[in-house]
Image: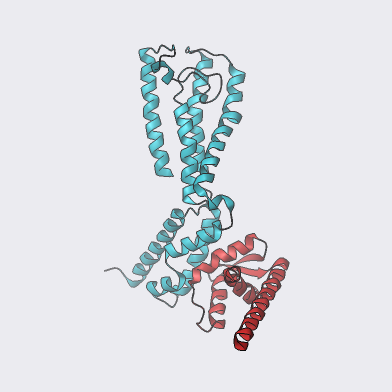
Chain colours: A cyan, B red
Amino acid sequence: MPSEAAVRVDADATFAAELKGALHREGLRGAYAAKLQAEWLGHYANLRDSLTVGEAIARLGSPDELAASAARTRFEGRWWCAWPVASGVLAGLAAFLLATALCLTPVMFILDPKVAWTWGLVEVYAHLFNWLGALAGLLTLVWFTGRCSSPPPFRRALILSFALPVLILAMDFKAPSGGPGTGSFSLGAYLGFGYDLSPVDYLLLAFRLAVFVAAFRWCRRAA
Amino acid sequence: MHAFTNGLPELLILRRLSAGEMYGYQLVSEIAKAGEGRIKFSEGCVYPVLHRLESKGILATREEEVGGRLRRYYRLSQSGKKRLAQLLDELQAVNRSVDLIGGLAHAL
Protein backbone atom coordinates (compact mmCIF):
# COMPACT_ATOMS: atom_id res chain seq x y z
CA MET A 1 0.00 0.00 0.00
CA PRO A 2 1.55 3.36 -0.95
CA SER A 3 2.44 5.73 1.88
CA GLU A 4 0.54 8.96 2.45
CA ALA A 5 3.56 10.93 1.25
CA ALA A 6 3.67 8.94 -1.99
CA VAL A 7 -0.03 9.51 -2.58
CA ARG A 8 0.49 13.21 -2.01
CA VAL A 9 3.39 13.32 -4.47
CA ASP A 10 1.27 11.48 -7.05
CA ALA A 11 -1.68 13.85 -6.59
CA ASP A 12 0.56 16.91 -6.85
CA ALA A 13 2.27 15.53 -9.98
CA THR A 14 -1.14 14.85 -11.53
CA PHE A 15 -2.23 18.40 -10.82
CA ALA A 16 0.99 19.77 -12.37
CA ALA A 17 0.52 17.63 -15.49
CA GLU A 18 -3.13 18.68 -15.85
CA LEU A 19 -2.09 22.30 -15.49
CA LYS A 20 0.51 21.93 -18.22
CA GLY A 21 -2.01 20.24 -20.54
CA ALA A 22 -4.65 22.91 -19.91
CA LEU A 23 -2.17 25.71 -20.69
CA HIS A 24 -1.19 23.96 -23.91
CA ARG A 25 -4.83 23.54 -24.95
CA GLU A 26 -5.47 27.24 -24.41
CA GLY A 27 -2.49 28.14 -26.62
CA LEU A 28 -0.25 29.39 -23.81
CA ARG A 29 3.33 28.30 -24.39
CA GLY A 30 6.97 29.20 -23.89
CA ALA A 31 8.35 31.38 -21.12
CA TYR A 32 4.96 32.91 -20.29
CA ALA A 33 3.36 29.51 -19.68
CA ALA A 34 6.38 28.34 -17.67
CA LYS A 35 6.25 31.43 -15.45
CA LEU A 36 2.51 31.04 -14.84
CA GLN A 37 2.84 27.35 -14.09
CA ALA A 38 5.71 27.93 -11.67
CA GLU A 39 3.71 30.51 -9.72
CA TRP A 40 0.55 28.43 -9.66
CA LEU A 41 2.48 25.42 -8.42
CA GLY A 42 4.21 27.55 -5.78
CA HIS A 43 0.83 28.82 -4.62
CA TYR A 44 -0.57 25.30 -4.69
CA ALA A 45 2.36 24.06 -2.58
CA ASN A 46 1.65 26.77 0.00
CA LEU A 47 -2.01 25.76 0.12
CA ARG A 48 -1.09 22.06 0.35
CA ASP A 49 0.88 22.75 3.52
CA SER A 50 -2.44 22.94 5.35
CA LEU A 51 -5.10 21.65 2.94
CA THR A 52 -6.01 18.46 1.08
CA VAL A 53 -5.64 18.25 -2.72
CA GLY A 54 -9.35 18.92 -3.26
CA GLU A 55 -9.40 21.90 -0.92
CA ALA A 56 -6.23 23.36 -2.44
CA ILE A 57 -7.60 23.06 -5.99
CA ALA A 58 -10.93 24.55 -4.89
CA ARG A 59 -9.07 27.59 -3.55
CA LEU A 60 -6.57 27.95 -6.38
CA GLY A 61 -8.92 27.01 -9.25
CA SER A 62 -9.09 23.95 -11.49
CA PRO A 63 -6.45 23.63 -14.25
CA ASP A 64 -9.03 24.37 -16.97
CA GLU A 65 -10.38 27.37 -15.12
CA LEU A 66 -6.89 28.77 -14.49
CA ALA A 67 -5.74 28.28 -18.07
CA ALA A 68 -8.92 29.83 -19.48
CA SER A 69 -8.55 32.85 -17.23
CA ALA A 70 -4.88 33.21 -18.20
CA ALA A 71 -5.76 32.99 -21.91
CA ARG A 72 -8.46 35.65 -21.55
CA THR A 73 -6.06 37.98 -19.76
CA ARG A 74 -3.26 37.31 -22.21
CA PHE A 75 -5.20 37.66 -25.48
CA GLU A 76 -7.86 40.26 -24.71
CA GLY A 77 -7.33 43.62 -26.35
CA ARG A 78 -5.11 42.24 -29.13
CA TRP A 79 -6.65 42.88 -32.53
CA TRP A 80 -5.30 39.72 -34.11
CA CYS A 81 -6.79 37.64 -31.29
CA ALA A 82 -10.23 39.18 -31.86
CA TRP A 83 -10.47 37.50 -35.29
CA PRO A 84 -8.05 34.58 -34.86
CA VAL A 85 -9.01 32.60 -37.97
CA ALA A 86 -8.90 35.55 -40.37
CA SER A 87 -5.64 36.87 -38.93
CA GLY A 88 -4.20 33.33 -38.91
CA VAL A 89 -4.96 32.85 -42.60
CA LEU A 90 -3.42 36.22 -43.45
CA ALA A 91 -0.33 35.47 -41.35
CA GLY A 92 0.03 32.04 -43.01
CA LEU A 93 -0.14 33.49 -46.50
CA ALA A 94 2.30 36.24 -45.52
CA ALA A 95 4.68 33.59 -44.15
CA PHE A 96 4.36 31.66 -47.40
CA LEU A 97 5.17 34.71 -49.52
CA LEU A 98 8.07 35.56 -47.24
CA ALA A 99 9.49 32.04 -47.39
CA THR A 100 9.26 32.08 -51.18
CA ALA A 101 10.51 35.60 -51.74
CA LEU A 102 13.29 35.84 -49.18
CA CYS A 103 14.60 32.31 -48.85
CA LEU A 104 14.00 30.40 -52.03
CA THR A 105 13.71 32.62 -55.08
CA PRO A 106 16.99 34.55 -54.68
CA VAL A 107 18.96 31.36 -54.15
CA MET A 108 17.49 29.76 -57.23
CA PHE A 109 17.93 32.88 -59.31
CA ILE A 110 21.61 32.92 -58.49
CA LEU A 111 21.99 29.23 -59.27
CA ASP A 112 20.30 29.19 -62.67
CA PRO A 113 17.30 31.21 -63.75
CA LYS A 114 16.40 28.95 -66.69
CA VAL A 115 17.24 25.48 -65.60
CA ALA A 116 15.86 22.41 -67.38
CA TRP A 117 14.95 19.09 -65.79
CA THR A 118 18.14 17.06 -65.98
CA TRP A 119 20.02 15.35 -63.18
CA GLY A 120 22.84 17.86 -62.97
CA LEU A 121 24.13 19.29 -59.72
CA VAL A 122 22.24 22.53 -60.22
CA GLU A 123 18.97 20.74 -60.85
CA VAL A 124 19.34 18.53 -57.79
CA TYR A 125 20.09 21.62 -55.81
CA ALA A 126 17.06 23.31 -57.33
CA HIS A 127 14.79 20.52 -56.17
CA LEU A 128 16.25 20.61 -52.71
CA PHE A 129 15.20 24.23 -52.39
CA ASN A 130 11.98 23.91 -54.28
CA TRP A 131 10.69 20.94 -52.35
CA LEU A 132 12.69 20.13 -49.24
CA GLY A 133 13.16 23.84 -48.60
CA ALA A 134 9.41 24.31 -48.56
CA LEU A 135 8.98 21.40 -46.18
CA ALA A 136 11.76 22.75 -43.97
CA GLY A 137 9.94 26.09 -43.92
CA LEU A 138 6.78 24.34 -42.82
CA LEU A 139 8.53 22.42 -40.05
CA THR A 140 10.21 25.61 -38.86
CA LEU A 141 6.86 27.40 -38.75
CA VAL A 142 5.22 24.61 -36.74
CA TRP A 143 8.21 24.48 -34.37
CA PHE A 144 8.31 28.25 -33.94
CA THR A 145 4.58 28.74 -33.38
CA GLY A 146 4.66 25.87 -30.90
CA ARG A 147 6.83 28.04 -28.68
CA CYS A 148 4.79 31.22 -28.86
CA SER A 149 1.49 31.92 -27.13
CA SER A 150 -1.46 32.47 -29.46
CA PRO A 151 -5.14 31.48 -29.56
CA PRO A 152 -5.40 27.90 -30.89
CA PRO A 153 -7.64 28.90 -33.87
CA PHE A 154 -5.00 31.45 -34.92
CA ARG A 155 -2.19 28.91 -34.92
CA ARG A 156 -4.31 26.29 -36.68
CA ALA A 157 -5.32 28.73 -39.42
CA LEU A 158 -1.75 30.00 -39.76
CA ILE A 159 -0.20 26.56 -40.17
CA LEU A 160 -2.85 25.25 -42.53
CA SER A 161 -2.87 28.34 -44.74
CA PHE A 162 0.93 28.13 -44.97
CA ALA A 163 0.99 24.37 -45.43
CA LEU A 164 -1.58 24.12 -48.20
CA PRO A 165 0.07 26.42 -50.77
CA VAL A 166 3.57 25.34 -49.82
CA LEU A 167 2.84 21.64 -50.06
CA ILE A 168 0.74 21.89 -53.20
CA LEU A 169 3.33 24.03 -54.94
CA ALA A 170 6.12 21.82 -53.66
CA MET A 171 4.61 19.20 -55.94
CA ASP A 172 5.94 21.37 -58.74
CA PHE A 173 7.89 18.84 -60.68
CA LYS A 174 10.02 20.41 -63.36
CA ALA A 175 13.16 22.07 -62.11
CA PRO A 176 12.23 25.61 -61.24
CA SER A 177 13.72 29.01 -61.84
CA GLY A 178 12.63 30.12 -58.37
CA GLY A 179 10.95 28.96 -55.21
CA PRO A 180 7.84 26.81 -54.80
CA GLY A 181 5.48 27.14 -57.70
CA THR A 182 7.79 28.97 -60.03
CA GLY A 183 8.59 25.98 -62.17
CA SER A 184 6.19 24.11 -64.44
CA PHE A 185 3.44 22.63 -62.33
CA SER A 186 3.39 18.85 -62.58
CA LEU A 187 -0.37 18.72 -63.02
CA GLY A 188 0.28 20.48 -66.32
CA ALA A 189 1.43 17.11 -67.65
CA TYR A 190 -1.99 15.62 -66.99
CA LEU A 191 -3.82 18.62 -68.33
CA GLY A 192 -2.03 18.33 -71.68
CA PHE A 193 0.21 21.36 -71.43
CA GLY A 194 3.01 19.60 -73.24
CA TYR A 195 5.07 18.06 -70.43
CA ASP A 196 6.13 14.46 -70.91
CA LEU A 197 6.95 12.59 -67.74
CA SER A 198 9.08 9.45 -67.72
CA PRO A 199 8.34 6.46 -65.42
CA VAL A 200 11.02 7.74 -63.04
CA ASP A 201 9.21 11.06 -62.96
CA TYR A 202 5.98 9.31 -62.01
CA LEU A 203 7.81 7.44 -59.26
CA LEU A 204 9.19 10.70 -57.88
CA LEU A 205 5.79 12.29 -58.17
CA ALA A 206 4.22 9.45 -56.17
CA PHE A 207 6.95 9.82 -53.56
CA ARG A 208 6.25 13.54 -53.26
CA LEU A 209 2.54 12.88 -53.01
CA ALA A 210 3.15 10.44 -50.15
CA VAL A 211 5.30 13.00 -48.36
CA PHE A 212 2.66 15.65 -49.03
CA VAL A 213 -0.06 13.53 -47.42
CA ALA A 214 2.14 12.59 -44.45
CA ALA A 215 3.25 16.19 -43.87
CA PHE A 216 -0.27 17.50 -44.14
CA ARG A 217 -1.58 14.96 -41.63
CA TRP A 218 1.27 15.85 -39.28
CA CYS A 219 0.47 19.56 -39.65
CA ARG A 220 -3.17 18.96 -38.81
CA ARG A 221 -2.18 17.02 -35.71
CA ALA A 222 0.35 19.66 -34.66
CA ALA A 223 -2.15 22.47 -35.23
CA MET B 1 -19.49 50.73 -15.47
CA HIS B 2 -18.34 47.74 -17.50
CA ALA B 3 -14.86 49.24 -17.75
CA PHE B 4 -14.85 49.82 -14.04
CA THR B 5 -15.86 46.29 -13.09
CA ASN B 6 -13.24 45.00 -15.53
CA GLY B 7 -10.65 47.01 -13.62
CA LEU B 8 -11.69 45.77 -10.19
CA PRO B 9 -9.07 43.01 -9.82
CA GLU B 10 -6.42 45.49 -10.92
CA LEU B 11 -7.60 48.04 -8.36
CA LEU B 12 -7.62 45.46 -5.55
CA ILE B 13 -4.11 44.32 -6.43
CA LEU B 14 -2.66 47.81 -6.75
CA ARG B 15 -4.35 48.93 -3.53
CA ARG B 16 -2.84 46.05 -1.56
CA LEU B 17 0.57 46.51 -3.11
CA SER B 18 0.55 50.21 -2.22
CA ALA B 19 1.25 49.00 1.35
CA GLY B 20 4.50 47.37 0.21
CA GLU B 21 5.88 44.53 -1.89
CA MET B 22 4.24 41.11 -1.61
CA TYR B 23 4.50 37.69 -3.22
CA GLY B 24 1.47 36.11 -4.86
CA TYR B 25 0.27 33.89 -2.03
CA GLN B 26 0.70 36.71 0.47
CA LEU B 27 -1.14 39.15 -1.79
CA VAL B 28 -4.09 36.79 -2.28
CA SER B 29 -4.27 36.15 1.48
CA GLU B 30 -4.23 39.91 2.15
CA ILE B 31 -7.02 40.54 -0.37
CA ALA B 32 -9.11 37.73 1.12
CA LYS B 33 -8.51 39.03 4.64
CA ALA B 34 -9.32 42.63 3.70
CA GLY B 35 -12.49 41.52 1.89
CA GLU B 36 -13.58 39.56 4.99
CA GLY B 37 -14.72 36.71 2.76
CA ARG B 38 -17.04 38.89 0.68
CA ILE B 39 -14.82 38.79 -2.40
CA LYS B 40 -14.97 35.32 -3.96
CA PHE B 41 -12.41 34.43 -6.62
CA SER B 42 -10.14 31.58 -7.69
CA GLU B 43 -6.83 32.52 -6.16
CA GLY B 44 -4.84 31.44 -9.21
CA CYS B 45 -6.62 33.98 -11.42
CA VAL B 46 -4.58 36.72 -9.75
CA TYR B 47 -1.34 35.65 -11.45
CA PRO B 48 -2.28 36.38 -15.09
CA VAL B 49 -3.38 39.84 -13.96
CA LEU B 50 -0.08 40.33 -12.10
CA HIS B 51 1.87 39.32 -15.20
CA ARG B 52 -0.14 41.64 -17.41
CA LEU B 53 0.50 44.55 -15.03
CA GLU B 54 4.17 43.63 -14.95
CA SER B 55 4.39 43.59 -18.76
CA LYS B 56 2.80 47.05 -18.83
CA GLY B 57 5.42 48.34 -16.40
CA ILE B 58 2.84 48.98 -13.67
CA LEU B 59 4.48 46.42 -11.38
CA ALA B 60 8.13 45.62 -10.79
CA THR B 61 9.33 42.23 -9.53
CA ARG B 62 12.19 40.50 -7.81
CA GLU B 63 12.71 36.85 -6.95
CA GLU B 64 13.94 35.31 -3.73
CA GLU B 65 14.25 31.73 -2.57
CA VAL B 66 12.68 31.10 0.83
CA GLY B 67 12.65 27.64 2.39
CA GLY B 68 13.47 25.97 -0.92
CA ARG B 69 10.61 27.74 -2.71
CA LEU B 70 11.08 30.54 -5.19
CA ARG B 71 9.04 33.60 -4.31
CA ARG B 72 8.33 36.34 -6.78
CA TYR B 73 7.75 39.66 -5.06
CA TYR B 74 5.65 42.34 -6.75
CA ARG B 75 5.74 46.06 -6.02
CA LEU B 76 4.26 49.20 -7.54
CA SER B 77 6.45 51.07 -10.03
CA GLN B 78 6.15 54.83 -10.53
CA SER B 79 3.60 54.31 -13.30
CA GLY B 80 1.82 51.83 -11.02
CA LYS B 81 1.37 54.56 -8.41
CA LYS B 82 -0.08 56.86 -11.08
CA ARG B 83 -2.36 54.08 -12.31
CA LEU B 84 -3.62 53.45 -8.77
CA ALA B 85 -4.39 57.16 -8.32
CA GLN B 86 -6.26 57.13 -11.64
CA LEU B 87 -8.32 54.07 -10.68
CA LEU B 88 -9.19 55.59 -7.29
CA ASP B 89 -10.33 58.78 -9.05
CA GLU B 90 -12.55 56.69 -11.32
CA LEU B 91 -13.95 54.87 -8.29
CA GLN B 92 -14.78 58.18 -6.61
CA ALA B 93 -16.46 59.41 -9.80
CA VAL B 94 -18.59 56.24 -9.90
CA ASN B 95 -19.47 56.72 -6.21
CA ARG B 96 -20.52 60.32 -6.85
CA SER B 97 -22.68 59.22 -9.79
CA VAL B 98 -24.34 56.53 -7.68
CA ASP B 99 -24.98 59.06 -4.91
CA LEU B 100 -26.43 61.50 -7.42
CA ILE B 101 -28.72 58.86 -8.95
CA GLY B 102 -29.72 57.78 -5.44
CA GLY B 103 -30.55 61.40 -4.56
CA LEU B 104 -32.65 61.84 -7.70
CA ALA B 105 -34.52 58.61 -7.04
CA HIS B 106 -35.20 59.77 -3.48
CA ALA B 107 -36.50 63.17 -4.76
CA LEU B 108 -38.92 61.39 -7.12
Q: Residue furthest left?
A: A1
Measured from the top left, where is residue A136 in percent x and y? 50, 33
Tell me what residue is drawn at x 54 percent, y 14 percent.
Answer: A115
Position of B28 relative to A154 (above/below): below
Measured from the top left, where is residue A6 in percent x and y? 35, 67
Residue A62 is drawn in which quadrant?
bottom left
Q: The N terminus of chain B appears in which quarter of the rendering? A: bottom right
Position of A80 relative to B6 (above/below): above
How many labels were placed on the picture? 0
Residue A201 is drawn in which quadrant?
top left
Residue A146 seen: no
User: Which residue occupies the foreground of this view, A105 or A82?
Assistant: A82
Q: The C terminus of chain B appears in which quarter of the rendering? A: bottom right
Tell me what residue is drawn at x 45 percent, y 54 percent.
Answer: A24
> Is residue A103 toward the left or the right of residue B88 in the image?
left
Measured from the top left, where is residue B72 in percent x and y? 59, 67
Q: Residue furthest front?
A: B108
User: Which residue occupies the foreground of this view, A164 or B80?
Assistant: A164
Position of A183 relative to A221 (above/below): above
Residue A166 seen: yes
Residue A207 is drawn in which quadrant?
top left
Tell me what residue is drawn at x 42 percent, y 77 percent.
Answer: A51
Measured from the top left, where is residue A116 in percent x and y? 51, 12
User: Which residue occupies the foreground of this view, A11 or B24?
Assistant: B24
Position of B56 relative to A84 (above/below): below
